[in-house]
Image (cartoon, rainbow, N blue to C red):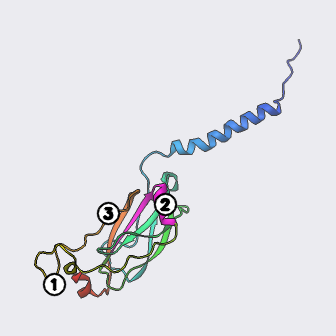
Amino acid sequence: MARPAIRLPTLRTVGIAGAAAGIIGLVVPFLIRSGPPFATIDSPSPKAPVGRCFIAKGRVDPGTIGRPLWLLMAEPGEPWREVGRVYPPPGTWGSRVCVGRDSASVRLALVLADDELDARLAGPPREEPDAEFPDWLRGGCAGQQQGGCGPRRRSPGLPAGATRVAFVSVPVAGANRSRAIAR
């Protein structure tokens, strides 16, 4: 009885099998990425006052993050601005944050950015608008010569294209409270 000969794979079949393995290797991690994104702001804690400059730290699971992750900050009455992009290292992140002299608190948010917001945050900084006129110099204040014309500026929401993952509001120690309260 003759033994069947073992047929060696051809270069073509090896190439097809390699391409299939490569495609599976690229697609499977995206399919496994189920569940909500996991990223935290562990430090500073919401109740402990911080100095004008501090290090914000946290944890991140890179397997759950499908879009660019950014750390944003906002002082009272001011718009959100970027601190930096969080490149997920093996489990932790950290970033230096500095606030203005008159800030009584600061809000920090970790957000997932869509492509448009990511490009805007990664691009060159925008010029600050000129100083705003006080409320009493603007039209629409019926008979007021000084003082406010309604409620003060509210803190704006997160920018368009941002999905909040983590958030913390922290008091700032040693801030010039009299000016911060007047805002």
Along the line of sight, the residue nearer the viewer: 136 or 72: 136
Residue 10 image position (x, y, % from top left): 82, 30
Quarter occupied by residue 47 = bottom left
Residue under numbered circle 3:
157
Along the line of sight, the residue nearer the viewer: 71 or 92: 71
Image side of residue 168 versus residue 29, left or right? left
Secondary element at image label 3: loop
In the image, which residues are magenta? 106-122
- Identify the residue shown where x is 46% and y is 45%: 34
Secondary element at image label 2: helix
Q: Amino acid at mark 1?
A: Gln
- Identify the residue shown where x is 21% and y is 80%: 137
Q: Amino acid at mark 2?
A: Asp
Residue under numbered circle 2:
118
Disc on res. 61: none
Along the line of sight, the residue nearer the viewer: 4 or 141: 141
Viewer-nearest of discs 3 and 1: 1
Residue 108 is a magenta residue: yes
Secondary element at image label 1: loop
**Sequence-first tag of 3 and 1:** 1
Residue under numbered circle 1:
146
In the displayed structure, 120 sits above or below 171; it is: above
